[in-house]
Image (tube, rainbow, N blue to C red):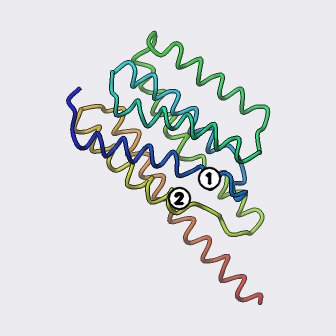
Amino acid sequence: MKMSWLGYVASSLASLLNMSQVPFAFSGKATTALPYLNTLCVCVLWLAYAIDHKDLFIYVPNAFGIMSGLICIIGTNNIVWWHSCILLVAFFLFYISDQIPNVYQYILIVAGICLFIAPVYDIVECWKRRVVIQTSWLFVVVSIVNTAVWIAYGVYHRLWTVWLSNAIGLTLITIQTIVILIYNLMIRKRYVEMC
């Protein structure tokens, strides 16, 4: 595959995105390990895609994602038994990826959607308890820039699986960011009124 500056930017941003989650995971603010489990599983799936397409730019950030995902899950200290079932499914799909190439591309898109909607669990939990949603704004900003660059990378290299999954991801991240901002403003305003 032709190398380009876009590939270096996309790969570097994705690696930074994966590693930026580690401090937040160990801060004790994460309500669940689910988003990190999703990151780990999706990176496992995309690693198979990268190996099949011999794309170093996709391979490197997903290798980082697997490492940071494991570290973050340990950092949250909030592991549930059924998490291992999801991980086993991801590794099984990784193993058979070369046998179902056409279906596998759609699996990647579904996995990407699951990755980007994982934070909804945190939003719902915080809403139930009427508390401010704790999030890493570095992670949010890098996520938005990262998905935008990967859309460009996918379009440039005609990798429809890459640009489509990231386009969906960018839409979901933007919606979630707006929801978090509005919700946190409402909660803080309520606290001020109560004081």
* x then y, percent, for residue 33: 69, 44
Alpha carbon distance from label 1 to label 2: 8 Å
* x then y, percent, for residue 30: 69, 54
CA neighbours of label 2 inside 10 A, class few (<14), some (14 to 19), many (20+): some
- Rendered residue at 36%/32% (across/down): 161
Q: Residue furthest top?
A: 99
Image position of 99 with respect to 12: above or below: above
- Rendered residue at 59%/25% (across/down): 90
Where residue 163 sits, quadrant-wise, is: top left
Foreground of the two, 79 or 162: 79
State the quadrant of the C terminus. bottom right
- Check disc 1 and report its element: helix, strand or loop: helix
> Pointer 1: what residue?
120
Tags 1 and 2 touching, CB below 8 Å: yes
State the quadrant of the N terminus. top left
Q: Which mark is residue 25?
A: none
Q: Amino acid at mark 2?
A: Gln
Foreground of the two, 171 or 11: 11
Q: Amino acid at mark 1?
A: Val
Q: How many marks?
A: 2
Image position of 88 with respect to 72: above or below: above
Where residue 185 sits, quadrant-wise, is: bottom right
- Check disc 2 and report its element: helix, strand or loop: helix
CA neighbours of label 1 inside 10 A, class few (<14), some (14 to 19), many (20+): some
- Rendered residue at 47%/34% (across/down): 62
* Mark 1 / mark 2, whichever is N-terminal: 1
Image position of 137 with respect to 37: above or below: below
* x then y, percent, for residue 191: 72, 82
* x then y, percent, for residue 39: 56, 39
Image position of 127 with respect to 24: above or below: below
> Pointer 2: what residue?
176
